Image (tube, rainbow, N blue to C red):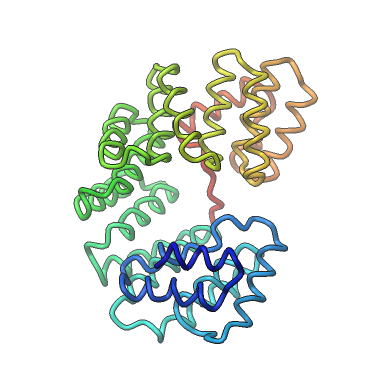
Amino acid sequence: LASEGWALLERRRYDEGIAAVSRAAALEPGRAWEHAGWPRDARDGGARSLRLRALAGLKARSGPVVHYFRARILRGLGREDEALSELEKARPLFKSCTWALECAAGELLVEIGRLGAARASFERAAALNPRHARARAWRGEVLYWLGRAQAAAREFDAAVRAEPEAAWAHAWRGQFLLWTGRYGEARRALDRALALDPRNAWARAWRGAAEALAGDPKEGLRDIETAIRLDPGDVEARIWRGELLARAGRTAEALRELSVARRRGPDRPWLYAVSAWARGLRGDERGMNRELAEARRLAPEVFAAAADVAGLERIFAAAKGNRTYRRLG
């Protein structure tokens, strides 16, 4: 039903699409926000504005899925307060799965950078449904960004215990272990994720990064290239591929890969940092400074001190396996 709904939405048959996705969410309320994934790939403001107008013209203008879609689109347009207001409108429409709404609100708050409020939402979700693995994993990620790695580790462990056969839970835990520099443990967690779901592109990319950072860059690059074949839109995997190619001395290929990544995800500060570093390795000081300026603009607290190749390498080392950025606030 959810897939049918997304297909209808893409064909601009909005009333029918919303109805199908809403039925899917009603049948599986615990996965309501997974089902409500549209529009996942609408990056430009014109497409978002078009879809926002479409939602305004629905015959059924209310319902948790409708409000969630509207919140996601408003978030994409930078209208963050309105986005949160839409989620609040969904509250009286929920009965038994208020925890799912709390989890959805928390995810939106993470994107906005309001991590303290996000943590509170995930804690309420976990209190309402202690075995809700996704809320536990999200709480773990928020705790990581707040500098509480040990508490975060406990949450990821709890998520895996809650859903031991869920590939995504093992993959997310593996990503956390990668971010904290525990590359051997990360690889074992990601091996488990891939045993459960061999086509999990994120797990494949993160395992490749763990392999490379643990001293096996060739195997790491193979895994990352497989991940890109599985999901050509994975910008983080392309950033990792660019970095590993540059480390292998293949800077021209690295810059071509990073150019593809830029077209798919132009708002990623690590993309510009890796590109600056690759250009610096080639002796292109002007190009390095141009890319560094963009990295600093997007993430000043991370890249403000970077001035040259050596400075960027120190930042890479401190970041361990993390090539993601969250605005903190």
- For the C terminus, the image quarter is bottom right
Q: Note whether residue 299 is visible.
A: no
In-front residue for pair 16/258: 16
Find residue 132 and report its image quarter: bottom left
Residue at image point 48% right, 28% down: 225
Res. 209 in view: yes
Horizontal side of residue 101 vs 238, given as left or right: left
Where residue 52 sits, quadrant-wise, is bottom right
The residue most toward the top is 249
Q: Is residue 55 above or below residue 10?
A: below
On screen, residue 170 versus residue 161, left or right, reads right
59 above or below 53?
below
Identify which residue, 168 or 309, lies in the foreground.
Answer: 168
Give residue 258's position: percent from left, percent from top: 64, 31
Residue 114 location (% of width, % of height): 51, 61
Specify the quadrant of the image occupied by residue 20.
bottom left
From this view, report whether residue 163 is shown above or below residue 52.
above
Report the label total: 0
* Residue 240 image position (x, y, % from top left): 52, 30
| Residue located 33% across and 58% down the image | 134
Report the residue that reaches farthest toward the right. 286
In the rendered image, the quadrant that contains the N terminus is bottom left
The residue that appears at 29% across and 40% down in the rendered structure is 193
Residues 108 and 224: in front is 224
Percent position of residue 216, x then y: 40, 17
In the rendered structure, the answer to whether residue 249 lies left or right of residue 320 reads right
Residue drawn at 60 percent across, 13 percent down? 249
